Amino acid sequence: MPGSGRVYVIGVDSTKASVDRLKKTLANFVNPGDHVHIAAVIPDPATEKTTEVGVAGSLGSGYTEPESGADKLKRRVKEVEDNFTTLYAPVLEETGIHYEVAVLLTPSKTKAIGEVLVSYAEKVHASAIVMGKSDRSALQELFIGSVAKVRSALHAVRVC
């Protein structure tokens, strides 16, 4: 349905599976007139509990200070930007679909990536959220968890 104006939020990371998920979504669901939000979720260094200490370098290299929260955030955002430029921009440019890129912060260990994506999807009035699902067994998910397990949204948002 061309020109439907649907909004998609696609959660991405630096994996090949994430690039493949984007390609499949663009090929099978997104039409001209739709809008895609590429969203990468990274931990907020300001809320991370850290045990980092300075590191004594190898002989003669001296002491290395631990990375500050601001430096860590800059580094993580730069990694996301680099991933977008090399992995996702070529795929999106090829389609001509209107898109935006968002780097979302999550307080470490307190808010799941899926919850951050749902909050963002609600903010941009998304029609659907696309995020990856690992091939973990039920027992592994019990102990490790799953990004794709999202239980609530303020309004109906389809999670693909």
Image: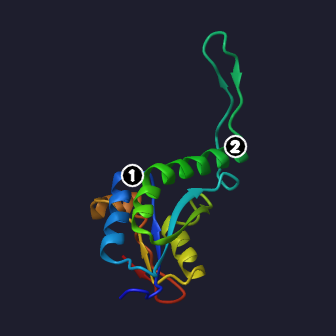
Where in the figure is residue 156, as x and y percent of width and height?
46, 89
Where in the figure is residue 37, as x and y percent of width and height?
51, 70
Which label was assigned to residue 15? 1
Compared with residue 28, is residue 103 higher up or lower down, i.e. above or below?
above
Quarter holding the N terminus is bottom left
In the rendered image, the residue lying farthest to the top is 60
Q: Residue at x 43, y 63 (%)?
A: 92
Q: CA distance from mark 2 to mark 1?
A: 24 Å
63 vs 28, nearest the viewer: 28
Q: Secondary structure at mark 1?
A: loop
- Is disc 2 surrounded by few (<14), some (14 to 19) or many (20+) residues within 10 Å? few
Q: Secondary structure at mark 2?
A: helix
Determine whether label 2 and label 1 are within 8 Å by CB.
no
- Can the viewer see residue 133? no
134 vs 52, nearest the viewer: 134
Where in the figure is residue 150, as x and y percent of width and height?
44, 75
Which label was assigned to residue 118? none
Sequence-wise first label, 2 or 1 = 1
Name the amino acid type tagged 1.
Answer: Thr
Say left or right for 17 vs 56.
left
Say left or right for 65 vs 146.
right
Q: Residue at x 51, y 70 (%)?
A: 99
143 vs 38, nearest the viewer: 38
Q: Residue at x 50, y 54 (%)?
A: 84
Compared with residue 8, is residue 144 higher up or lower down, i.e. above or below?
above
Q: Residue at x 57, y 74 (%)?
A: 120
- Can the viewer see residue 151? yes
Name the amino acid type tagged 2.
Answer: Asp
* Residue wearing tag 2: 71
